[in-house]
């Protein structure tokens, strides 16, 4: 069970990405399993991207945005919240474990929180095993 | 007069509704016979056998239409033969191009489907647990065979090369005329493309708020068609009826919308969409006021996969990846 999961992280440039930056500055430790993609806003993350990531074999997808009320664009993350809700139900109903998709609100001041989430999620995915689409590899 | 265009129709795993739509051409079909010669139309209209198709020389058919998904070994065999015999092959309708209704069966196991169809369904009386078997020896000497059901449903392009895709359940009959004209004029679109006007259903819908000067609001209620009767003038999404018009190709002229029924996506995804269900989720979620509405929506429609992928489950991203091995099915 010691595989390293491949996590794709979509991080909003105003909050979660800044949070990840801060995690680095604080020298917080977290596993190297997460690959961050900087997006202007978590509302930019089309559910199709998440689907594509899973279809290409990602073991987990993390979508990170600002806390509700803090969105740089006022309500981008409100839309993200609804979209990810429906998307995770869609994944579940399609026979895919929706726990592989995680939505987190991490602000630019929460460097340690980012590291904590990355570590937690990695552990969870290690317990779940690899993405079944890859055929258990 | 120039030589007639040799045309073939083949029903794979569908319901023959697409062929009904061709027959709906009525007099136009008779007129079209001046430039068309129907060489094969089975198993529905023409008195032709699969062996007749097998006996035709390769590439002798100019234009072939396949409607229906690939569900059993017979479908698989006949479409492969038809591909060899034809120059242009068209996936005609939602099933052939996206999987269609039957593709939702892939959300269950084969055993579940058989159990439901031959045992548990309300109108079935099967005390001896008789299930269809691909081979049967009758009276000890006649070896009878039936096509065997495949593990997965496939779209046409997952088993053979397809030149054109046409959406719709059933497709608009005008596509047949358009293709014939294009062949006569030698002006065929690039192979592998969808034959569509490229516009969304909203574009052709007469309730579109953009064309009727209605202001658009976020919705906080969710309704099914059985809950209420929609106002025929106002956008269905604005009334809380979940409509897939914004992400579906509108070659149908909005025919469901015209009779107060929300769009369910049979026309296929508008160009640029990679996964119909995910885009649908995104589109509907963004039109809701709050998370509570999204929750109401999920409670009301309970199965998202069967709602969003009603006509397109086989082409869903996740299913595609799982089905990577499909092409090897014997």
Image (cartoon, coloured by chain):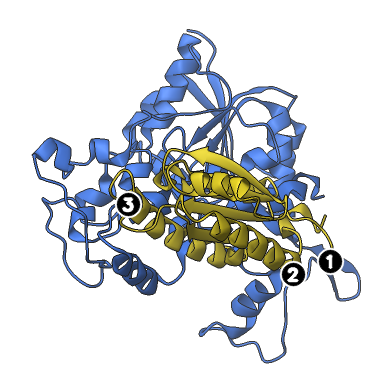
Kindly state the secondary structure of the residue where label 1 is placed.
loop
Can you tell which mark lies on residue B286? 3
Q: Are marks 1 and 3 in contact (CB under 8 Å)?
A: no
Dot 1 crowding, Cα within 10 Å, few <14, some 14–19, many 20+ = few
Name which of mark 2 and mark 1 comes first in the sequence: 1
Residue B176 shown left or right of residue B227 in the figure: right
Judged from this view, the residue extending furthest toward the left is B213
Q: Which residue is mark 2?
A: A127
In three-dimensional space, the C-alpha distance between marks 1 and 3, rounded to whole angstroms, equals: 39 Å
Percent from the top left, x then y, of residue B200? 33, 37
* Crowd class of label 2 (few under 14; some 14 to 19; many from 20; radius 10 Å): few
Q: Position of residue A34 (x, y in %)?
A: 66, 49
Query: Which lettered chain is shown in yellow?
Result: A
Chain under numbered label 3? B
- Disc 2 sits on a residue from what chain? A
Q: Is residue A83 left or right of residue B85?
A: left
Where does label 1 land, which residue?
A: A1
Front of the two marks 2 and 3 = 2
**Residue at the spot 58% in from the left edge and 27% down from the top edge:** B192
Label 2 SS: helix
**Identity of the residue drawn at 22% across and 66% down:** B221
Camera-nearest residue between B76 and B200: B200
Query: Quick check: can you spot residue B320?
Result: no
- Check whether the beta carbons of the residues at disc 2 and disc 3 lie within 8 A of each other: no
Marks 2/3: CA–CA distance: 33 Å
Q: Quadrant of the C terminus of chain A?
A: bottom right
The answer to whether B243 is drawn above or below residue B2 in the figure is: below
């Amino acid at each position: 069970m010691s595989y390293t999961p491949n996590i794709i992280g979509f991080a909003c440039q105003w909050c979660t990405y800044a949070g990840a930056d801060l995690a680095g500055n604080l020298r917080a430790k977290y596993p190297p399993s997460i690959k961050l993609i900087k997006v202007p806003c978590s509302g930019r993350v089309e559910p199709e991207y998440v689907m594509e990531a899973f279809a290409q074999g990602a073991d987990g997808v993390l979508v990170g945005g600002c806390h509700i009320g803090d969105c740089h664009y006022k309500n981008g993350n409100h839309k993200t919240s609804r979209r990810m809700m429906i998307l995770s139900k869609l994944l579940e109903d399609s026979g895919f474990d929706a726990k592989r998709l995680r939505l987190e609100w991490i602000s630019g001041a929460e460097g340690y929180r980012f590291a904590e989430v990355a570590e937690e999620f990695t552990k969870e995915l290690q317990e779940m095993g690899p993405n079944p689409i890859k055929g258990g590899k | 007069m120039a030589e007639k265009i040799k045309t073939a129709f083949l029903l794979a795993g569908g319901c023959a509704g697409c062929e009904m739509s061709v027959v709906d051409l009525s007099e136009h079909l008779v007129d079209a016979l001046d430039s068309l010669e129907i060489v094969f139309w089975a198993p529905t209209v023409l008195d032709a056998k699969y062996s007749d198709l097998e006996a035709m020389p390769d590439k002798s058919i100019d234009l072939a239409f396949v409607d229906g998904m690939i569900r059993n070994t017979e479908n698989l065999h006949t479409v492969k033969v038809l591909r060899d015999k034809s120059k242009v092959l068209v996936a005609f309708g939602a099933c052939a191009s996206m999987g269609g209704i039957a593709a939702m069966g892939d959300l269950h196991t084969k055993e579940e489907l058989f159990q439901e169809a031959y045992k548990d369904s309300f109108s079935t009386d099967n005390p001896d647990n008789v299930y269809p078997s691909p081979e049967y020896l009758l009276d000890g000497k006649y070896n009878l065979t039936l096509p065997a059901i495949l593990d997965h449903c496939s779209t046409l392009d997952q088993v053979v090369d397809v030149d054109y895709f046409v959406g719709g359940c059933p497709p608009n009959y005008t596509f047949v005329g358009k293709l014939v004209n294009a062949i006569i004029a030698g002006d065929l679109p690039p192979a592998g493309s969808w034959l569509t006007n490229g516009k969304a259903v909203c574009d052709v819908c007469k309730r579109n708020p953009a064309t009727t000067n209605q202001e658009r609001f976020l919705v906080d209620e969710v309704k099914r068609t059985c809950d209420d009767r929609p106002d025929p003038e106002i956008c269905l999404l604005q009334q809380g009826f979940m409509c897939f018009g914004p992400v579906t190709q509108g070659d149908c002229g909005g025919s469901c919308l015209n009779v107060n029924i929300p769009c369910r996506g049979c026309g296929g995804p508008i160009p640029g969409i990679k996964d119909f269900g995910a885009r649908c989720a995104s589109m509907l979620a963004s039109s809701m006021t709050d998370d509570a509405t999204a929750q109401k929506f999920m409670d009301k429609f309970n199965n998202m996969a069967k709602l969003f992928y009603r006509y397109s489950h086989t082409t869903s991203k996740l299913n595609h990846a799982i089905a990577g091995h499909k092409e090897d099915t014997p």
